[in-house]
Structures are given as structure tokens and as C-alpha cells.
Image: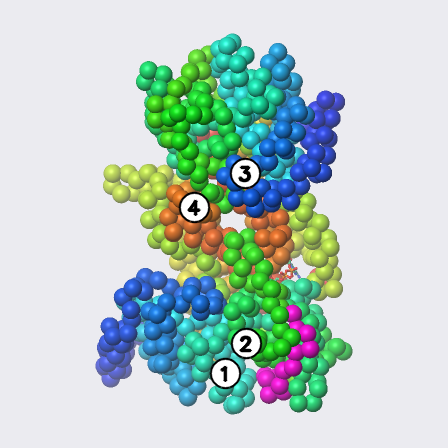
Amino acid sequence: MATQLEPEARENADVFREEVRQFLAEKFPEELKGKGLSMGGIEGREKETPAQKAWREAMGERGWGTPTWPKEYGGGGLNRKQAAILNEELARAGAYNPIGGMGVMMFGPTLLEYGSEAQKQEHIPPICRGEIRWCQGYSEPNAGSDLANLQTMAEDKGDHYLVNGQKTWTSGGQWADKCFAIVRTDRSDKHKGISFLLIDMDSPGVEVRPITMISGTSPFCETFFTDVKVPKENLVGEEGQGWTIGKRLLQHERTNLSGAAPGGRGGGSLADIAKKYGKVNADGTLADPVLRDRIADFEIRWTSFLHTARRAVEESKAQGGVSEISSALKKLGTKLGQERAEMTIEIMGLQGLGWEGEGFSPVELAGVRAWLYGKATTIYGGSTEIQNNVIAKRVLGMLDHQ
Amino acid sequence: MAVLNEEQEMLRDMAREWATNESPVTEFRKVRASGEPEAFDHTAYGAMAEMGWAGIIIPEEHGGSDFGFLSAGLVVEELGKTLTASPLIATTLAASAIMLGGSEEQKAKWLPKLASGETIATLAVDEGPHHDPAEIATSVSDGKLAGTKGFVAEAHGADLFVVATTDGLYLVEKGDGVTLTTRRLTDQRSHADIALEGAAAEKLENGGDTLLDDVLNRARALTAAEMLGMAQIVFDTTLDYLKQRVQFNQVLSSFQALQHRMADLFAGLAQMRSAVEAGLQAVDSGVGAERAAIVAKAEANRVLHTISNEGIQLHGGIGMTDEYDIGLYLKRARVLEPTWGATGYLKNRFATLGGY
Ligand SMILES: Cc1cc2nc3c(=O)[nH]c(=O)nc-3n(C[C@H](O)[C@H](O)[C@H](O)COP(=O)(O)OP(=O)(O)OC[C@H]3O[C@@H](n4cnc5c(N)ncnc54)[C@H](O)[C@@H]3O)c2cc1C
């Protein structure tokens, strides 16, 4: 529901908008126009260009990469209206938020809620400046959907924990500086024996092995811990509180992932792509009525998904908790993203299935990889099947059949 | 499963044994790693030809065994199961064009060489990324061809091309006036664009007005057979995985949500199999071949699309790894889907044939 701003608020908004515009005019490098943050910011910094670095530092300094986080820890300290204005102006300038990754999407918000003062002081500012990359040490070979079955053990050694075990599918593990992990501190209780621990990836005994994916890239790893010493001050919350904290983090993850399914957005809307690769009538409409129908059908569902996402945010703000429909968001958004990617390659025909080499545009090649990588979106962050279970049991109150 | 005669059963068993033992997916991975644009193993193709597979549809008088398309489909299905890379389908389809449209001389000249594996051949029909035989622009004057063919499968290894032109089908040998440009698709098999500039060509005169359509029916049915093998393996592998993967102290196969999904896929696969077999049989009998071939390919497109996506999803994270085979099937599946007709094209054609 759109609300009328009070005159004073409107004036403040205008002042803030002007401030953002000036900042963008001064600091946003023209050459980055229309680009985005690659791989959600988990990739290493080796490939960062001087322009990208300058842009990241400029935004980081203002705290505008994490606009609503408290100023005292390096965030932007903006209210919701201001954050919305910032977003609008970024979009208008063809700019993007250069600060991302798991630190921003999930770890930061969780630490702000559960961390000690010292932990927040230490870890939040570098996240706001985009200086430190975090990876997620959750999954293990036998703890995927059944995450609480994790076996990586953290033994209490007085002033430190000694960590042994194996994590898998660690996205960005090879580029990360630090890892937020859930580990076992007690074998006698499945859920209460879990603790939330911050591990330095440079620590002796940490080994990562990248795994190649079907899309041809290797952004995720097996991570091994052998007698890794982790100082006690790196425990977040109480010992045994890890499952509660870990699940909270997953809520942030889900919300962030729902609309983020990479679908090879390059090339414009599905209709634009269809016009480029197919036949168009004299009046500019698509000549293939079936395709036209399918695109319209998709766009209608995509639009109503965006409405749903917005409603979930509004409801959770209003009721001060998670909206009932937020559980459905990840399932819906990721499926739609995959559908879009499938339609994109279908519309392009064999031209949309290039792997490498001559004869394909960068957008076409990126589209194929994104289509393949996008298959993961319904698997990670709580698979679609697990979302269905959550909806059935927790929202609808249906009984567990087991 | 179609009712097979003894010869067909033997053929299928032999193909299954050979594919399993001599050509498992690791062999395709070697081909892929070599990066050669031809993308197949010559020794393996030699072995196939020796077993008589290149001549399955070719008449005995020309060195084949005259077993027909249902039999060819049995072999192709087994090869699809292990992602065996070979020009067998392409050569079989080119041979069928010569059988349907060639003069006695042309048949005598080419069919024995195709049957023995000495000559590799392929069809060059479409000119762009979409199957659209109504849009052919390649033309002929004074027996010389001019035009471009897009995404021709197995072009790199081919000695002979069956080229569709505005004036029917022509035989073109590799050589002057034929230039290949490699197109690397996600399945990492052989695909190329072919520029034809003054290439010498000989017409296939005898097939009548429907020659191209008759060949395309065969192309659709046989490609659907490869897709059937792929769908079957993705299904089997997924079922096996669900039966052994433990989460929440139970094997995944005990979850009803997954049981129902597998039941749906099973039913889809059953339909795909009968559609594909009916398509191949109709080609052999000549009765209602076009309709049956369209049904075969459209069902193959639909079911393999679903099964290949579900296969990844149900494997979870491991399905996303290159090391695990399932992704290779997904990538090959998407390349075969638009080949000889994406679903939209086929539905439109089906409706047209039905007069609506
Ligand atoms: C690209 C990618 C990146 C990832 N990044 C990270 C990361 O950075 N850090 C990290 O810790 N993890 C990461 N993961 C791991 C991810 O969270 C797991 O893959 C996911 O939790 C699923 O676990 P699994 O792979 O073991 O599949 P399984 O749990 O074995 O599931 C296999 C299939 O069974 C289904 N299933 C399982 N249980 C049930 C049930 N009870 N009812 C119905 N269906 C069920 C699943 O939905 C799935 O379809 C990543 C995964 C991928 C693919």
C-alpha cells in the first residue's frame, strides 16, 4: 500500500536522493555501467579490475553496500525509505551494489542478532566494506537435507576447540577468508549438540578441494578439517545453541535466494529474446502465437511472484516475524528462474546451446552456463522438497507420515 | 517393449553387452577430454560397423542386413544409454536417403561403403538454429551447390553429405566447395556449420516429392530412440540412488513425496517407450509414418526433458558435479530436443496433418 509522505519527510527524501545522485556521478565508473556482481560476490578478487575495486571501496566507505545495517558497525544506517531511494538511483545510473556474498546475505544479519559485542565489532565492518569473504560450512557428505546429522566434531580443549571432519559443497571455499560453520560439540543429542563456530580458512589443518560442476566452473569445494585449532571467542552464542542460530541463518539464505535464481538475464526480457531469435509480424508482435502465449503465461506468473515477495516482506515487517508465505517464496522463485532459463535456450534453438568457441555471443554462452548452474537453486538452501515438507508440517500443520 | 523376433533380441543383447563393456560413459569422457572436433572414437565405430550396425537398414544386396528401423532403434537406444559418441545415426539416416531416392548406380556406389563403415555420411538439412525444412535456401545451378547449413551433426567425420536444397536432396562429397566451421555445443559432440560454394553435387532423383519428409520421419524416430536410452538410464540411476541414499535415518526411497515423483516418471517413460517403438515400426511398415514419427519425437522431447531435470534434482548436490554422469545426459538431452523438431514445431505439424 503506497503511503503519502509528510511534507518534511518528502523534503528529506529529496535531499537524500540528491546526495545519492552526486555520489554516483562522482564515484560510479562509467565502464561498469550495466554490469553486475559476478557469482553473487563469492568469487575471488584476483579478477577484480581497478574500476571494480574503486567502486567497491567507495560504496563500502559509505556503508551503502549494507544500507540498513547499523552505522556503528560500518553499515549505512539508512531507513527503509532511504534504502529504497538508494536502490532506485543505483538502477537509474545502471549501477549495482558491489558488496555481496554470504557475509552480506546471511552471516552478517545472523551475527548482528546473536553475536557478542566484540564479535560484531570485529566481523561486521569488513563485511560492510567487502573486504572479507565468508563461506558456509554446513553440508557434509551425509548431512545434506538432514543437516542436523552433521558429524564434524569440535572438541573443547580449554581455550580452544579442536575441529576434525569434512564439509562439502562449500561454495567459494577456495576464495573465502573465513567460514561460518555448524559443528558438533556433543554427540549425545542430535540438535542440542550443535554449535556455531567461526573458522579462519588460513588455519593450519584446513584443506579445500574445488569440485567441477556441470556448468564447467568450480565454485564449490570439499573442505577438510584436520586438528584445526579454533579460539573459544569464535563461538557464536552458547555452546549447543548452534542449531537455533544456524536455522535463523537459513531463513536469511532462503529469503535471499528466492528471487536470485540465475536465469541468464542477459539478452533482455523473454519477449526481446524471442523477437531477436524468431519471427516478428509487421506490427511488432511475435509471429508464433504459441510462444507468445507461453511468454505471457510466464510473465504473468513472474509478476505475481514479485507481488508475493513484496507482500511477504511487508507482512513480516508488520507482524514482526516471518510471513507464512515466506516458506513458499524460495520454492516459487527458484522454479520460475529455472523455467525462464529453459525457455531462453529453447527460444534460441541450437544457437542457445553453445559451450565455447566461435559462433556464439558472450550472452549466449553465459546463458548456457547459467541454465546449468541454475539447476542448483532448487537443491541448495533447503531443496524444494524440504520447503514442501516445511510448508506441510509447520505452516499447514499436517502430520509427519513417518 | 515391442515384441521382438529372435534376431532382434540377439541384436539388442549384443548392443547392450558391447555398450556396457566396451563403451561405458568413461569412453565418452575420453572423447570429450581429447577436444577433437570429430568427437568420436574411430576404433569404436569400426567395431560397430564390423558387428553390422552401420548396415542394419541397408538391403542385403548392398552389404547390409535389411533389419529395418525398429532394429536400428534397438541398437541406438543401447548406445544412448552410455552416451556413445559415433556417427552411426547420421550415417544410417544418410543411407536411408540414398535407399529412398538414389538411382541404382548411386545405391551401388554408396550403400556398401556405408554398411561397411568405410564411408561416414550425414544429413545437412537445416540452415539455422531451429529445425525448419520449409525455409531451405540452399540452391543448385549446373550441378553446383550454394548455401549454408547450420549445426550439422557429425559433419567433421563425414565423407559424404546428403544436402537438402530448394530442388530436392543432393549428394555432396567432402572436398572443394565444402567448408566446415566447428560449433561447440553443450553436449560436446561434433557439430559444424557448412558453407557450400560451388560444391559438386548429384541429385537423388527417385524419391518423389516427399523424399525429404520421408527422411525426416526416420531422423525423428531414430533420434527419439537415442533419447529413450538416455531417459531410461537417467531414470534407473536416479531410482538406484534414492534406494541407497540415507537422510533422516531413512533411505530417500521411503519418502512418499519422492515415490510419487518416481511413479510419474515411470509412467512417462512407459509412454515414451511405446511412442518411440511405434514411430520406428511405422517407418518400417510405411503406414502413418509421419504422424507416428512426430508422436515419437514429441514424446521423447517431453519425457526426457522432465526426467533429465528431475534426475539432477533428486540427486541433490552430487547431481550438479561434472564427475557424476547425470549432467552429461542433461546436456545431450537439450541438444537433441530441438534436433529434427522442437516440441512447438512438432505440435504444429501434427495439427496440420490432422487438418486443424
Ligand atoms: C551449487 C551448490 C552450492 C552449495 N553451496 C553450499 C555451501 O556453500 N555451503 C553448504 O554448506 N552447502 C552448500 N550446498 C549444499 C546444499 O545445501 C545441499 O546440496 C542440499 O542441502 C541438499 O543436500 P544433498 O545434496 O545431500 O541432497 P540429499 O539430502 O541427499 O537430497 C537428495 C534429494 O532428495 C530430496 N529429499 C531429501 N530429504 C527429503 C525428504 N525428507 N522428503 C522429500 N525429499 C527429500 C532432496 O530434496 C533432493 O531432491 C550447495 C549445493 C549446491 C548444489
The residue depicted at 52 percent of the width and 54 percent of the height is A216
The residue depicted at 58 percent of the width and 23 percent of the height is B118
* A402 displayed left or right of B142: right
Please tell me in which quarter of the rendered image ligand 1 is found: bottom right
Amino acid carrying mark 1 in the image:
His
Tell me the CA gap for discs 2 and 1.
10 Å
Say if disc 3 is inside 8 Å of ligand 1.
Answer: no
Q: Nearer the viewer, mark 2 or mark 4?
A: 4
> Dot 3 corresponds to which residue?
B39
Answer whether residue A229 is magenta in the image: yes
Amino acid carrying mark 4 in the image:
Gly
Q: Position of residue B101 (x, y in %)?
A: 48, 15
Residue range of the region highlighted in magenta in the rendering = A224-237
> Dot 2 corresponds to which residue?
A178
> Dot 4 corresponds to which residue?
A357
Tell me the CA gap for discs 4 and 1.
43 Å
Q: Is there a contact, CB below 8 Å, between mark 2 and mark 4? A: no
